[in-house]
Image (cartoon, rainbow, N blue to C red):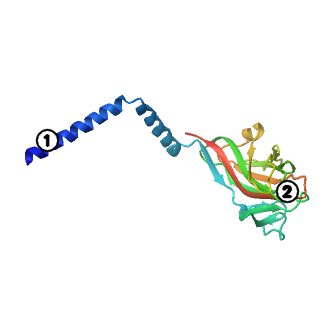
Amino acid sequence: MKHWILKTGIVILALVVLAESLWALSPRREEVINAQWHFLQGIDNPTTRWFILPLAAAFIDGTGIIGNDGTTAPGLAETDNVPAIVYATSAETTKIQWTFPLPADYSTGLGFRVLLSSSDASGANQSIDWQLWVNDDAAAFCITPISQAAVGSTCGTLDTTNDVLTLTMNATGETAVSTGSLITLDIWSASSSNGTTEIKGVYGLYTATQ
């Protein structure tokens, strides 16, 4: 019985060694290892990071904390089963604002994404304008915002389809910000129609140091 167990163990060990040898010679081995390495790099050392700017935390320029649509303009309402900041018409252009610190691992490339929809199907009538204020410790107040280019929608069915707009900071903004800066982001509707402008989400992205 003992001899049979010993022989069985030897056979299993030989099969394991053979399998490892064949794997080492396999042209797929390097591909698999590289794929695993890149996957782990993406988890452990991401270079692009993001953060959410909560809709309910928005401050209306010159007014105060945002309220329900109809109470404040713009205001919060549910559209298409999603919470949104709603500009009722093109006549509403008041800025909404958030202030946040630039993270300690910030390297470059601060930008934002805006999830947009409208009661107007034509995205050509919808755009988001924006600017930044940058304040730093022991520095004079920022009294002039850093203007950015408005971003329009190219979606032709904005009344039934989401459109994510990319707000890319210009070189002036890139030079002005640094780790620890307190950024105030202003965004507002630059719509040219009487359809609603519905902002359903805002988040920031940046390239982190490694």
**Residue 73, horizontal then vertical, whole percent:** 85, 64
Q: CA separation, marks 2 and 1? A: 78 Å
Q: Is residue 76 above or below residue 34?
A: below
Badge 1: how crowded within 10 Å, few (<14), some, or many (20+)?
A: few
Q: Is residue 57 visible?
A: yes
* Labels 2 and 1: the sequence-earlier one: 1
Q: Nearer the viewer, mark 2 or mark 1?
A: 1
Residue 51 shown left or right of residue 38 in the figure: right
Residue 99 % position (x, y):
72, 55
Residue at 75%, 52% (x, y): give it: 184
User: Along the line of sight, which residue is nearer the eye, 119 or 15?
Assistant: 15
The amino acid at mark 1 is Lys
In the displayed structure, would residue 142 be above or below residue 172? Answer: below
Q: Nearer the viewer, residue 79 or 3?
A: 3
- Return the mark for residue 138: none
Q: Secondary structure at mark 2?
A: loop
Residue 43 located left or right of residue 17: right
Question: What residue is shown with label 2?
Answer: 120
**Residue identifier under label 1:** 7
Q: Residue at x 8, y 44 (%)?
A: 3
Q: Quadrant of the C terminus?
A: top right
Q: Residue at x 66, y 47 (%)?
A: 205
Q: Residue at x 48, y 42 (%)?
A: 40
